[in-house]
């Protein structure tokens, strides 16, 4: 039986949106995520890498990983230039 780890984890995520090449409307996503308690940092250029990093630290199952990815995407759409 799978159960969620009840430990608390904190992450700092810095996201930078950049204009794509050639003046297109496409935005590029770059940044890094840090696991606060260990200081481990990973650089990323897409949402899946953020979700993978958090999921690995929390020991999330595949289905929960996809839910986390969706939540991150919704947060970015709600606050695109914060």
Image (spheres, rainbow, N blue to C red):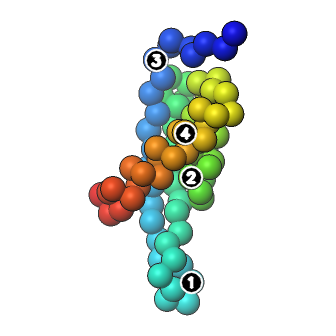
Q: Secondary structure at mark 3?
A: loop
Residue at which label 4 appears: 67
Gap in angstroms between the C-alphas marked 1 and 2: 20 Å
In the picture shown, does residue 63 fall above or below 78?
above
Residue at 68% from the left image edge and 33% from the top image edge: 62
Residue 57 sits above or below residue 18 on the image: above
Rate crowding at label 1 as few (under 14), some (14 to 19) or many (20 or more) other CA atoms within 10 Å. Answer: few
Viewer-nearest of labels 1 and 4? 4
Residue shown at 49%/88% (left/top)? 23
Tell me the quarter of the image containing the N terminus.
Answer: top right
Residue picked out by circle 3: 8
Q: Are marks 1 and 2 in contact (CB under 8 Å)?
A: no
* Nearer to me, 43 or 51: 51
Location of residue 47 in the rendering, given as x and y in whole percent from the top left corner:
56, 52
Residue at (46, 44) in percent of width and height: 71
Question: What is the spatial separation of the Cα atoms under label 3 and label 2, in whole angstroms?
Answer: 22 Å
Marks 4,3: beta carbons within 8 A: no
**Location of mark 1 (residue):** 21
Contact, mark 2 vs mark 4 (Cβ under 8 Å): no
Q: Which sits earlier in the primary sequence, circle 1 or circle 4?
A: 1
Query: How far apart are the alpha carbons under marks 3 and 1?
Result: 40 Å
Instruction: Estimate the x, y position of residue 35 in percent, counting from the top left.
Output: 52, 31
Q: Earlier in the sequence, mark 1 or mark 2?
A: 1
- Which SS class for mark 2? helix
- Dots 3 and 1: beta carbons under 8 Å? no
Query: Residue at label 2?
Result: 47
Q: Earlier in the sequence, mark 4 or mark 3?
A: 3
Residue 35: which numbered mark, if any?
none
């Amino acid at each position: 039986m799978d159960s969620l780890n009840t430990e608390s984890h904190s992450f700092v995520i810095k996201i930078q949106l950049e204009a794509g090449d050639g003046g297109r409307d496409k935005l590029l996503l770059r940044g890094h995520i840090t696991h606060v308690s260990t200081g481990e940092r990973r650089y990323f250029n897409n949402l899946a890498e953020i979700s993978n990093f958090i999921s690995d630290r929390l020991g999330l199952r595949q289905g929960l990983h996809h839910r986390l990815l969706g939540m991150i995407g919704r947060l970015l759409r709600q606050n695109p230039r914060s």
